[in-house]
Image (cartoon, rainbow, N blue to C red):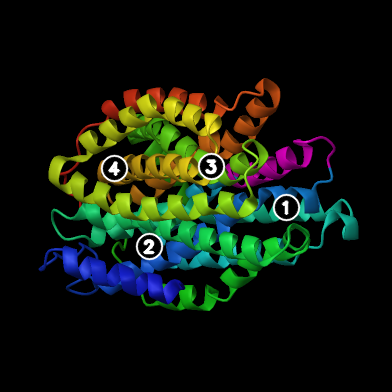
């Protein structure tokens, strides 16, 4: 599966399910936005998220390569901490690239993010280990993660804004759902590669060089991603000359309530998705399952995210954003502890896949609802910046620390329920915050 395949699949589904006669975006240069152009934005987003999250799947091996720390959890803690630092440049990327998209347009910002994440991925794929170049290896790896985080911090705002602004009337939830669905495709592709490598290579080969293969393969798709993004139409061209500073300042001055509540509502999405990504490490380190079995959870999580993001988007269009935001969060809060108790008590491929499937499905549904509700509440002039800040700050504070916090809790408490209780706490906070946000299904997004 490559970027072209993802784009074609998205285009075919959008053509089949979307209503004809979509109104043009207010500032679009053409009379109609091509659905294939929207699919192209999704394919590029999938590639970028694949590059970013693949690190999590191979954290055990990356830790041993770059971080020779003693103890059972030592190198793993160092590796997931380095995974987390990528989240802390997301707010900077959200500010810089989000404001750039509101000033210069969605298209140039989306091309910039692909270029930045490519540099970071190349550094991770080609970097010699600690045994070869010493302390320089972990330092450069951290820099690459920071660069990837910067790119992703600026990716979500422009891409989601384009999807919302290009959508036909009454279909914004479905169009926006492709943002989360494309992440599911990225996860599924990573899962397929993880399983294939685990079956084809010995543990020694996987630790020595096999974990680098998925990073190198993604670099082959970069020219395709850049090409299709160059062909995107523009859905927002600012008629007023503004500085990036003034755009960011207006978000904090005029829309700080949405910003704050959006960040808190993002908490459970960020934590639950990162716990899902952590299931491979959890299965290997805590449940003592084989690596090939553990990687199967990645494939399951990706497929369920893809399917239920689209379900969530369709339900958003029919029943509104708030309901789809609330009910799956509440279900996750109630179910997650019993599910983890079952998994820890009877660890097997079956229980691992079922728990991963439920976690991914519920997270995809409320994640989609949140991702469309927040930008709809923001005016077009600051939509990219506002959403970039909400997403980047929320994922940095909560998602960026999840894998480290969970690993630390497991190491300290020796309690396999630690990830579940962390999800419960974040879900409670997010349900309260998102219920304070108004319904946005019928707002005018061209205002």
Q: Nearer the viewer, residue 381 or 350?
A: 350
Q: Position of residue 433 (x, y in %)?
A: 34, 26
Image disc number at residue 106: 2
Q: Which residue is mark 3?
A: 348
Q: Is residue 75 visible?
A: yes
Q: Please tell me whether mark 1 sits on a helix, a strand or a loop.
A: helix
Q: Label 3, label 4: how many angstroms apart (C-alpha)?
A: 32 Å
User: In this rendering, is residue 357 above or below 430?
Assistant: below
The mark nearer the N terminus, 3 or 4, is 3
Q: Nearer the viewer, mark 4 or mark 2?
A: 4
Q: Position of residue 106 (x, y in %)?
A: 38, 62
Image check: 27 left or right of 70?
A: left
User: In this rendering, is residue 314 above or below 123?
Assistant: above
Write the residue at 16% across / 44% down.
443
Q: Are marks 4 and 1 in contact (CB under 8 Å)?
A: no
Q: Please tell me whether mark 3 sits on a helix, a strand or a loop.
A: loop
């Amino acid at each position: 599966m490559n970027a072209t395949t993802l784009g074609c699949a998205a285009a075919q589904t959008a053509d089949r399910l979307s209503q004809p006669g979509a109104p043009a975006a207010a500032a679009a240069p053409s009379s109609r936005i091509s659905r294939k152009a929207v699919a192209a934005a999704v394919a590029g987003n999938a590639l970028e998220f694949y590059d970013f999250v693949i690190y999590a799947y191979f954290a055990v091996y990356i830790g041993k390569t770059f971080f020779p720390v003693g103890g059972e959890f030592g190198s793993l803690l160092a590796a997931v901490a380095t995974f987390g630092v990528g989240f802390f440049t997301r707010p900077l990327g959200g500010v810089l690239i989000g404001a750039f998209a509101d000033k210069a347009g969605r298209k140039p910002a989306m091309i910039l993010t692909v270029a930045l994440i490519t540099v970071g991925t190349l550094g991770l794929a080609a970097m010699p280990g600690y045994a070869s170049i010493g302390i320089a290896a972990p330092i450069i790896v951290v820099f690459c993660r920071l660069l990837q985080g910067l790119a992703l911090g600026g990716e979500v705002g422009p891409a989601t804004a384009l999807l919302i602004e290009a959508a036909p009337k009454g279909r914004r939830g479905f169009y926006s759902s492709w943002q989360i669905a494309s992440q599911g495709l990225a996860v599924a592709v990573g899962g397929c590669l993880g399983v294939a490598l685990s079956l084809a290579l010995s543990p020694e080969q996987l630790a020595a060089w096999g974990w680098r293969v998925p990073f190198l393969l993604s670099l082959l798709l970069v020219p395709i991603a850049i090409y299709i993004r160059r062909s995107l139409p523009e859905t927002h061209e600012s008629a007023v000359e503004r500085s990036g500073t003034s755009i960011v300042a207006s978000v904090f001055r005029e829309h700080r309530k949405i910003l704050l509540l959006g960040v808190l509502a993002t908490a459970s999405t960020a934590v639950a998705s990162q716990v899902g990504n952590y299931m491979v490490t959890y299965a290997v380190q805590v449940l003592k399952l084989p690596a090939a079995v553990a990687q199967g959870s990645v494939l399951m999580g990706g497929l369920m995210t893809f399917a239920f993001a689209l379900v969530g988007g369709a339900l958003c269009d029919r029943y509104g954003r708030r309901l789809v935001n609330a009910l799956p969060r509440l279900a996750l809060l109630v179910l997650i502890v019993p599910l983890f108790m079952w998994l820890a008590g009877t660890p097997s491929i079956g229980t691992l896949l079922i728990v991963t499937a439920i976690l991914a499905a519920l997270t995809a549904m409320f994640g989609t609802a949140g991702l469309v509700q927040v930008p709809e509440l923001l005016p077009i002039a600051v939509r990219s910046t506002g959403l970039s800040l909400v997403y980047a700050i929320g994922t940095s504070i909560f998602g960026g620390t999840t894998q480290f916090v969970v690993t630390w809790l497991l190491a300290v408490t020796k309690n396999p329920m630690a990830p579940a209780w962390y999800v419960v706490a974040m879900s409670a906070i997010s349900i309260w915050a998102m219920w304070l946000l108004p319904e946005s299904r019928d707002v005018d997004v061209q205002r």
